[in-house]
Image: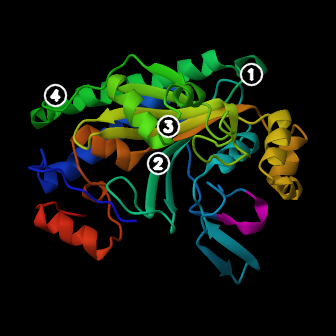
Amino acid sequence: MLTTVIPQGYAPLLNLYDTQKAIGLLKRLFEDDLGGALNLRRVSAPLFVEASTGLNDDLNGVERAVSFDVPDAGRDAQVVHSLAKWKRLALHRYQFSVGEGLYTDMNAIRRDEELDNLHSVYVDQWDWEKVIAPRDRNADYLKGVVNTIVNALADTQATLRSVYPQLTPLPLIERAVSFVTAQELEDRWPELSPKEREDRWVKDHPTTFLMGIGGALKSGRPHDGRAPDYDDWALNGDILVWNALLGRSFEISSMGIRVSPESLDRQLTVAGCDHRRELPFHRALLAGELPLTIGGGIGQSRVSMYLLGKAHIGEVQASIWDPRTIEACREAGVILL
């Protein structure tokens, strides 16, 4: 269902050309800050992967990948949904050591995405992944990395505001992160939907890391879908901020400590995905041939929207929109790229 809503009286803080310049600046600033803080090196990434490898992200398991054949290679390919599994394999192939990682520009097509202010069929992220030691597979390590990412976002915002004083009316990112689990939110508001619980919590805790996504809660339902073969459901989460312009929680990043052979074995069974055990990536992981890692995706368009005070994701990326969205934005004077 289409739910694009432009807030009453909304006007962009930056004109079209300044918006484009500011997007370029914030991407450079954030990449440099994140890469330095987490010891990440930039690498090139694929737009598509072989369908038979099991490397594509299955998201919630129902989204259809854009597929095509490559006649000269005799292979079928899929445009990526994300690079969650590819990055871990790349760390192994490139022989990264513990404490070292990579980041890349990830561009994807999610053809079944429902279009609204925050969602598009075109997805752009900073995808990152880092090798960790067995002792790092714990919640405290995860929280430390979350704090590092939030501080990088806040530092980027501070520099942007100095270059573009028009942005000073926007709220500052709260550096103090509130950590809460999906189960704690369900216990507190069992009558609400997961999204309503997020909104209630994040409104009072403007920077939140919501932990434990993918596994079933006490109600028997997960807070949200998460594929069983990259995040460890007990050691993952979403970075959420409060978007005062849209009056809702706003996801910046999905991330987590990745599955070990043991947790992959367990989650594949729970999710009814045992058939994936025969795919090359999954065989290697179950055999202990891949490094232990932490990683995630940070939405480039989401960060641009938030730091530049934009009401619609189409103001910071070029995509395809339905006629109702185009008309609603035209009437509100919102320029879609």
Q: CA distance from mark 1 to mark 4?
A: 39 Å
Q: CA distance from mark 1 to mark 2?
A: 26 Å
Residue nearest the observer in this picture, 224 or 111: 224
Q: CA distance from mark 3 to mark 2?
A: 33 Å
Image quadrant where residue 203 sits: top left
**In the image, what residue type sits under mark 3?**
Glu
Going 46% across and 33% down the picture, which residue do you hit?
Answer: 239
Q: What residue is disc 1 on?
A: 133
Res 191 label: 3
Residue 309 magenta-highlighted: no
Circle 4 residues within 10 Å: few <14, some 14–19, many ≥20: few
**In the image, what residue type sits under mark 1?**
Ala
Q: Please report contact status of discs 1 and 4: CB closer than 8 Å, yes or no.
A: no
Q: Which residues are magenta?
A: 49-54
Q: What residue is disc 4 on?
A: 162
Mark sitting earlier along the chain (3/2): 2
